Image (cartoon, helix red, strand yellow):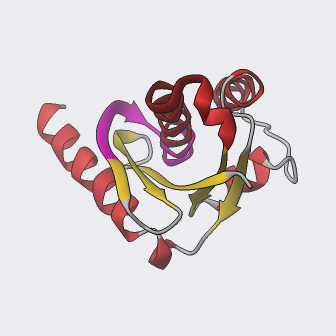
Amino acid sequence: MALKLIVNTDGGARGNPGPAGVGVVITSENGQVLKTISQGIGVATNNEAEYKAVILALETLKNMYGSKVHNYDIELRLDSELVQKQLTREYKVKEERLKVFFTQIVTLQLKDVPKVHFVHIPRTQNKIADRLANEAMDAQCYLI
């Protein structure tokens, strides 16, 4: 039986586009918080920030676990229904700027983090990642 990790991500921008930030929370299956990240990403749109949060989460998992990440089933939860449906291929990625991020995520999946499942959750179930993304956005507003 594979081990399981739960990863919550969120991204947002003030102004869309505007000062943007991402939040990532990685927990064990029993709810123990293993890592949190709050990071400003400069100026971006909300959808770009959502994608960048997923990329940051996958890269962090790769760095934390190396090749052992293959032993984990990863449930990646995000409150952006659009991005989740694009990553599960229910929707096509039409926006050129998002296609770059989509391709980067698919490459990370194929090479480094193969057992990731993208799950849409309501914003009310994503409070910690949302708070981390908002903290990063607030910090970006002071820099720009």
Point out the residue furthest to the left here: 142
Residue 21 lies left or right of residue 138; in this view the side is right
Boundaries of the magenta span: 36-51
* Residue 73, above or below 106: below
Residue closer to the observer: 36 or 51: 36
Residue closer to the observer: 115 or 21: 115
Residue 103 lies left or right of residue 27; in this view the side is right
Q: Residue at x 53, y 46 (%)?
A: 50
The answer to whether any part of residue 14 appears in the image is no
Residue 97 lies left or right of residue 21; in this view the side is right
Q: Position of residue 63 (x, y in %)?
A: 46, 25
Q: How many marks?
A: 0
Q: Residue at x 32, y 43 (%)?
A: 37
Q: Residue at x 39, y 58 (%)?
A: 129
Point out the residue furthest to the front here: 1
Residue closer to the observer: 32 or 6: 32
- Please tell me in which quadrant of the rendered image residue 4 appears: bottom right
For the N terminus, the image quarter is bottom right
Q: Position of residue 76 (x, y in %)?
A: 61, 53
Q: Position of residue 98 (x, y in %)?
A: 66, 32
For the C terminus, the image quarter is top left
Residue 110 lies left or right of residue 124; in this view the side is right
Residue closer to the observer: 33 or 46: 33
- Please tell me in which quadrant of the rendered image residue 58 appears: top right
The answer to whether any part of residue 126 appears in the image is yes
Does 61 lie within the magenta span? no
Q: Residue at x 74, y 42 (%)?
A: 115
Q: Position of residue 77 (x, y in %)?
A: 59, 59
